[in-house]
Image (cartoon, grey):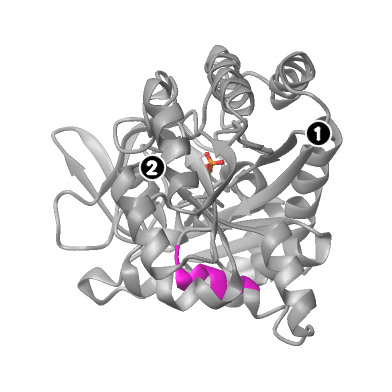
Amino acid sequence: MKERALTLAREHGTPLFIIDHEVIRANYRTFKKHLPRVQAYYAVKANSNQEIVKTLFEEGASFDVASYNEFMQVYEYIRHFEEKDQDVYIWDKIIFSNTVKDRDTLRKIRRYKPLVTFDNEDELKKIKEHCDTAGVVLRLKVPDIGSQVEMSSKFGAEPGDARRLIGRAFDLGLVVEGLSFHVGSQCTTFDNYAAALDIAAQVLHDGRQKGYPVKIVDIGGGFPVPYDTRVPQFEKLAGIVTAECERLFPEDVELIAEPGRFMVATAAVLVAEIVGKARREGKIFYYINDGVYQTFSGVVYDHWIPNFHAFQSGPAEVCAVVGPTCDSFDKISLSEQLPADLQIGDYLYTENIGAYSIASSTRFNGFEGAKILHLNN
Ligand SMILES: Cc1ncc(COP(=O)(O)O)c(C=O)c1O
């Protein structure tokens, strides 16, 4: 890919964000192969590029959407279905995983009879008032310590409050279709999955004993990407999840998941150009034409640790790589081992940058962000 990326950068200009759709397909198939009982809902938020949605739609993936706009990105491909087939598709293959939805969104999605998550009573009442056609999924708070992005400080009902909330939903005339959780994104502490599955199983069995026919367990996202060699293997996690699910859930429980990062992170490479070079207090600063306000936004929002590589080799030293804006905050990395003799006009490339990167890019300072190039789509 390295040589090809260089050729493409010369041909198309930089910054260039190259997405290889064959890698996305391979990631989806790996997920299905190792978690055969789990229906994979791609979390569109990880990279909402329309071509990625299309590729995964064609692969047969289901979708986790966070907003009406993301829902419409998927709806695009079922628009031509007959109404009853649309209904079947939406019910079976789309989940609104955002636990808090504004009233306007609820009113807009009411006609589609969606599956939506909630984690508190006010949300339930809002769903009842503005989207009473919805099936609801209760999101549980689970351990997320050690994940790159933690979730439980903002989302999830206390497991001890679950029985009351399930009862409240049925009292309101809503049907609790399932339970969900998220162990935090880029979860490398696999015990957190085991603990979360245990919590979900207790709530499920308790609910069933009370006569509530809870059917779905949504094991969320968090599936780790091999950003470096210390990340434990997905295959190992899949083995743990599979064994725990066999132990905890009877066959009539439908298992679903919301993988985002896992599907897209390894599918993209960014090539940026060195536009300036300075020595500051002895250290080389390479200024490139992409930064934390654009494709490297994940360094801020996703706590992502970037990687930089030069296309040519040379005597290396610890360098800083910084973005093009006038903000001194726009420093992507202060410690990259790079050749010291790179010149303005040379390129750097960054691997595994497909998730939570262009998805949160801005136009700050008037910089457009990277041009997107699709391969094998
Ligand atoms: C509700 C929900 N589901 C799924 C995901 C995707 O998680 P990941 O990219 O870790 O797979 C997220 C990420 O923020 C999320 O908030």
139 to the left or right of 193: left
Q: Quadrant of residue 230?
A: top right
Residue 82 screen position, x and y as percent: 79, 85
**Along the line of sight, which residue is nearer the eye, 191 or 267?**
191
Q: Can see residue 375?
A: no
| Residue 16 sits inside the magenta stretch | no
Q: Can see residue 69?
A: yes
Dot 1 alpha-carbon crowd within 10 angstroms: few under 14, some 14 to 19, many 20 or more: few
Dot 2 alpha-carbon crowd within 10 angstroms: few under 14, some 14 to 19, many 20 or more: some
Provide the residue designation for mark 2.
Answer: 302
Give the amino acid type for the residue marked by disc 2 in the picture.
Asp
Q: Secondary structure at mark 1?
A: loop
Provide the residue designation for mark 1.
Answer: 252
Q: Is residue 15 above or below residue 263?
A: below
User: Separation of disc 2 and disc 1 at Cα?
Assistant: 36 Å
Give the amino acid type for the residue marked by disc 1 in the picture.
Asp
Q: Quadrant of residue 114?
A: bottom right
Residue 23 screen position, x and y as percent: 75, 51
> What secondary structure characterizes most of the magenta part?
helix
**Along the line of sight, which residue is nearer the eye, 264 or 87?**
87
| Residue 71 sits inside the magenta stretch | yes
Q: Which residues are magenta?
A: 67-74
Q: Which mark is residue 156?
A: none
19 to the left or right of 163: right
Q: Residue at x 60, y 26 (%)?
A: 204
Query: In the picture, which quadrant includes the C terminus?
Result: bottom right
